[in-house]
Each structure stands twice: as structure tokens, then as C-alpha cells.
Amino acid sequence: MSKRKMTQAILSPDGKVMIKNKSGKRVEPEDKTDWNRLESMVDEDINYDDIPELDEEFFKKVAKPWPPAKKQLTIRLDEDVLEWLKGQGKGYHTRINHILRIAMDHQKHA
């Protein structure tokens, strides 16, 4: 069994994807996009074969208001979990919501 080194991706509070470099410092990933080629493309150059049709279910989802209304509540978290969340930087309430939304969406599609 081969051991692959995993790159940890982190979502910063301002919505940027960051990765940890070899020294552990968070940096923005290298952009490997060929912007000149993309900007010169016309619609006919784009291959849409792997993009699914937009069906009624898609349009039901996009018609829902976003973001959904927030509701204030009090929760109890393990001390180490709260320290970890706060240690990720500003916006830990939003981060908790994001983590729970991913878990909810995953469970819906399981």
C-alpha cells in the first residue's frame, strides 16, 4: 500500500481556499490556469459533454432564498472543539454552520 502525502485545504473566514506548505504556513494555492487561452475561447470551443442538463430539481433549489434565515441558539461544545474552531481564525460561528451544512447535505445524498 502506497503512502501518499495529503495536502490539507482550509477555507479561510473570507472564503479563500488556503493550503499548508511544507513549513506549516497557510498560503494560497498556485494558480495553474492558462488565463490567456481561456480568455481567447469562444462558446464553440467549450465541451459541455460532462455537464448534466439543468432539470426541474435544479431550478427548485435555485429558487430558494439564499442564504437561509439564521436562528440564534445556544449550544454546548467540548472545550477542545471550541478551541479548535476559534483557532482557525475569525468567523467560528459561520464555520460551525458550514460544517453542519456539509454534514446535512452529505446525509441527504447518502
Image (spheres, grey):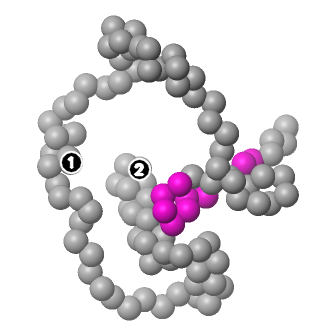
Q: Confirm whether residue 48 shows in the render.
A: yes
- Of the numbered discs in the image, which one, if any, rests on residue 61? 1
Q: Quadrant of the N terminus?
A: top right
**Dot 2 corresponds to which residue?**
110
Identify the residue at horizontal 52%, vertical 25% (top origin): 35
Is residue 65 toward the left or the right of residue 98 in the image?
Answer: left
Image-quadrant location for residue 57: top left
Image-quadrant location for residue 83: bottom right
Packing grade of label 1 (10 A; few <14, some 14-19, many >=20) is few
The residue type indicated by label 2 comes to: Ala
Image-quadrant location for residue 2: top right
Above or below for 15 versus 6: below
Packing grade of label 2 (10 A; few <14, some 14-19, many >=20) is few
Q: Which of 108 and 90 is in front in this view?
A: 90
Q: Position of residue 82 (x, y in %)?
A: 58, 84
Identify the residue at horizontal 16%, vertical 40% (top origin): 59
Q: Confirm whether residue 107 shows in the render.
A: no
Is residue 87 toward the left or the right of residue 102 in the image?
Answer: right
Report the span colored magenta.
Answer: 6-16
Residue 54: in magenta span = no
Q: Residue furthest top?
A: 44
Q: What element carries label 2?
A: loop
Identify the residue at horizontal 80%, vertical 45% (top origin): 5
Separation of disc 1 and disc 2 at Cα? 18 Å
Q: Where is residue 33 in the image (x, y as percent from the top left)?
A: 57, 28
Q: Which of marks 1 and 2 is nearer the N terminus?
A: 1
Camera-nearest label, 1 or 2: 1
Q: Is the magenta stretch mostly helix, strand or loop?
A: loop
